[in-house]
Amino acid sequence: MSSALDELRGLGKRLTALGLRDVEELAALNERQLLALPGIGPGAVARIGSFLAARDRKLAVDPYAAYECARHSDTARDAELRSYFLCDACRNAYSSDAFSGLAPEWVSGERIDGYCGNCNELLVVRLSQWFACGTCDRVMRSIGRSISSARFVEASWARSVKHTTEYRLVETDPVALRPRGKRSDPERKPTVDFEVHTPDGQVILGLELKSGRSALPRDGVGTPMSQFQLDTTDCDDITTAANTIAAPVLLVHAQVIGRAEAPTERYVGVGLWFARPWEMLDSLEAVRQRPRETRDAAYFKTKMFRPFSEIPAYLETELEQDRRRMTDEGFPPLYQR
Ligand SMILES: [Zn+2]
Ligand SMILES: [Zn+2]
C-alpha cells in the first residue's frame, strides 16, 4: 500500500482530507463519484486521469453512465436502446453508412415476414437494436415514410404522365439515413428532390417533396388541413435550388399514412398534390414562429394546391409559360414578412 497520492500535491492533500488513502481507493471511484466530491471539478478529474494512467490504472466504469448514441457517436442523456424491424440490407447500411461501422447492440434470432422500417419492402426482417438519442430515433423513424413517399411520387408520375420519356423523372438526392450533422453541412447546397429531364437531358422542372400524415383538399384520406406550413428555411432552399437548376420548382405534398402489418408497419401514399410557386405568395396567410420552436414558418392557404392528377395538364399548358417567366423575372418570392 503506497500513499502515492502525495504526488498530486495540493490535490492529493485534498483527496486525503476527504478520506482517500491510496491509489487503490482512488481508482475504485468513477468520474461521477469524483465530481460529487467537494472541490473536485473537471480539471481535477483530468489530472487524476493522467496520474492513474501513468500507473497503468484508470477510474472505475460508472454503472449509470449515459449511453452513446450510435448516430452521433457521443454520449447523450436520453440515449437508450431503440428497436427497429429491418431487412438485412438496410441493417447493414445503417451500420456502415450512418453509424460509422457500429454493429447493432442486439439482433433478434427470429426472422419475420414483415415491412422493413427503412426501405418499406415486404421482406424477411429482424428486430434490431442500437442505442440512440430521442432526436436520432425520430429521424430514423421518419426515413421509412420518406422513402415510401418518394416511391409514391414515382409511381404517380408513371401513372399520370403518359409521356415519361419526354418528361423523365429523376430522383436527385435519394433519402437515406446519414450520420448526424451531414444534412446540416453548410457546404451542402440545397437541391430539389426530383428533376424532370427532357430526352436530351435538359432540366425543365424541379419537384420539392414534403410528406406528412394529413390530407389537403380534393384528394387523400381524412379531414384536409386548413393551412399548410413550411419552414422559411425550406422556402429559401427551394428558391436556391430553383436558381441552381434554372427551372421552376413545384412544391409537392404527399399524404403517407402508416398501416399496421403486425408487428411491422407499412407506409402507404394515399394523396398527392402540387403547388405552382407563382401562386404561393397570394396564398400566404402569415409568417410566424412555430409553436414551441424557434424556427419561423410560412403558413399558406391550402387552395394553392392541386391534385397531382392535374400534373399532365400543367406540363402541357403551363410549364412553358412558367419557364419563360423564370427566365424573364426570376423565381418568385414564396413568402414575405
Ligand atoms: Zn430494408
Ligand atoms: Zn443521437
Image (tube, rainbow, N blue to C red):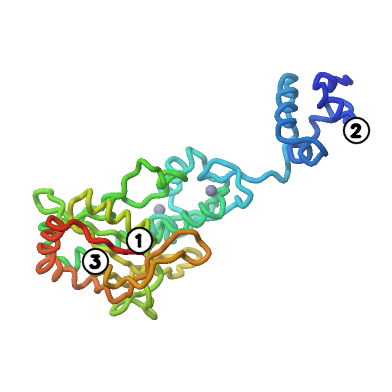
The quadrant in which residue 39 appears is: top right
The Cα atoms of the two marked residues, 3 and 2, are separated by 73 Å
Percent coordinates x, y for residue 69 in the rendering: 56, 46
290 with respect to 12 (left or right) = left
Residue hosting label 2: 19
How many C-alpha atoms fall within 10 Å of the one at disc 2: few (<14), some, or many (≥20)?
A: few
Residue hosting label 3: 156
The Cα atoms of the two marked residues, 1 and 3, are separated by 12 Å
Q: Quadrant of the N terminus?
A: top right
Percent coordinates x, y for residue 281 in the rendering: 28, 68
- Residue 70: numbered disc: none
174 with respect to 206 (left or right) = right
Residue lying at the far front of the rendered structure: 337
Pointer 1 and pointer 3: residues touching (CB < 8 Å)? no
Pointer 3 and pointer 2: residues touching (CB < 8 Å)? no
Residue hosting label 1: 148
Q: Amino acid at mark 3?
A: Ser
Percent coordinates x, y for residue 129 in the rendering: 55, 50
- Name the secondary structure under disc 3: helix
Q: Amino acid at mark 1?
A: Ser
